[in-house]
Image: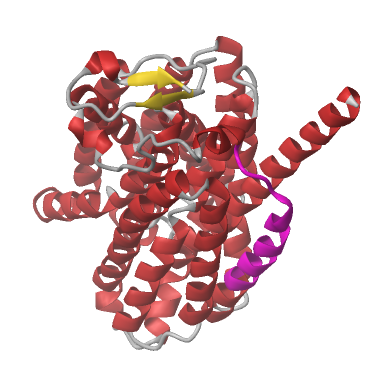
Amino acid sequence: MTDSHTVKTARNIIMLVIVASLGYFVDIYDLLVFSIVRKASLLDIGVSPDNVLSEGIYIINLQMAGLLIGGILWGVMGDKLGRIKVLFGSILLYSIANFANGFAHDVNTYAVIRFIAGIGLAGELGAGITLVTETMSKERRGYGAMIVSAIGLLGASAAVFAAQFGWRNAYFIGGGLGVILLLLRLGTFESGMFKNIEQTKVSKGNFFMLFTNFRRFKKYLFCILIGAPSWLVTGVLVNLAPEFGIALRAKEPLDAGQGVMYLYIGIAIGGIFAGLFSQITKSRKLTMFVFQVLLIIAEIAYLSSTGITNRQFIWICIFMGFGAGFWPIFITIAAEQFGTNIRSTVATTVPNFVRALLIPINFGFIAFKGSYGMINSAYIMISILNIIAMISLSQLKKTFGKDLNYLEVNEVDNPSLEIKPV
């Protein structure tokens, strides 16, 4: 009986990791499909070549705003109603939005639908990582997050492949993948830690708890800021590859879609190595530091590649992606920093706040660009974001092997009452 129960539990965990991985796969597909089809789709709906950059930034900013709002919405729901409900609700919303996106014929409609898709996208990663970290053993949960990230990030490659069939079909395919994922999720189960507190009177999913205790707020803010450098790479350095190619006097036009695909192949590979490195060293903080340094080196290599060729661009994108492979570690750190009653809120809002940071990053880059040009503006943003990230990382406590079966107490500025065991 015991052996049978153990085997069943192991199978359930494997199924959970697979479903969470495929959820992130579809999440990344939809998150990046606009960057891949940006130029072709905007030209097709009548945007002039001179306005492709500005209209593209407008649409991606709305998508990121949707992620910000959705992150709060789904995070709170995950702690109040359960992680599984979030996984179903979020995938349903963004699947519908993807189908609708295939019928967009003007910029404003396109932007509104991407905003709605952003809201839907926001729930996937946080809920999946929360389920994995709460279900697997504290010694091995890093492996689970590593697998989710490694498989999920390959969704970018799938988006590039789908875009070959036309930008509208790329959105239709994304919607279809979401529907398939809904069916696969019918066999998943809820987190045991959440079930233990489901009927308790403790405050669950209280987003404002993150702001009523100053120490808790600082910890939350630092969790967000350590991930900021990764979205400069995706949202600016690679998304604007055609424009950077001109500034670098590239020997041939640089393709943003191709860059995104190889960037995320690098992130998937880097995610595996980052996960293994954190398990071997038993330090998520050291892993974050090492990979952030690698990312800085890769960014410098990109911005100093005058006369860059497409082949060089591909390898640099893989290198930058490898450096940004700290993404699963970054999310795991956030999940491990907080109690069960607000863990989903944190794990869902943190990555989406990081994604939403692309809005001020874009504004900052554009503001500097007017005076310093494409290359120097990128260097300025790299310096600012990485200094902030390094300082924030130094302020967080180590969480490897931490027991997650505890609650956050809703007391104002009383650190001694911050947590209690379940």
Q: Overall secondary structure of the magenta stretch?
A: helix
Residue appearing at x 38%, y 56% in the figure: 241
Q: Is residue 245 magenta?
A: no
Residue 145 in sight? no
The percent coordinates of residue 167 (x first, y second) are 52, 77
Q: Is residue 185 magenta?
A: yes
Of the pair 193 and 218, the residue shown nearer to us? 193
Question: In which quadrant of the rendered image does the N terminus lie?
Answer: top right
264 over 2 or under it: above or below: below
Of the pair 402 and 380, the residue shown nearer to us? 402
232 over 225 or under it: above or below: below
In-image side of 27 versus 74 (left or right)? right
391 over 94 or under it: above or below: above
Residue appearing at x 60%, y 48% in the figure: 152
Residue appearing at x 62%, y 77% in the figure: 165
Q: Which residues are magenta?
A: 174-191
Residue 89 in sight? yes
Image quarter of residue 50: bottom left
The percent coordinates of residue 194 (x first, y second) are 53, 37
179 over 209 or under it: above or below: below
Identify the residue at the far left of this view.
371
Q: How is the image coloured?
A: secondary structure
In-image side of 108 versus 129 (left or right)? left
Image quarter of residue 91: bottom right
The percent coordinates of residue 217 (x first, y second) are 23, 30
In-image side of 32 versus 163 (left or right)? left
The percent coordinates of residue 281 (x first, y second) are 55, 11
Exactly how many numbered labels are in the figure?
0
In-image side of 268 versus 404 (left or right)? right
Image quarter of residue 337: top left
Residue appearing at x 13%, y 48% in the figure: 372
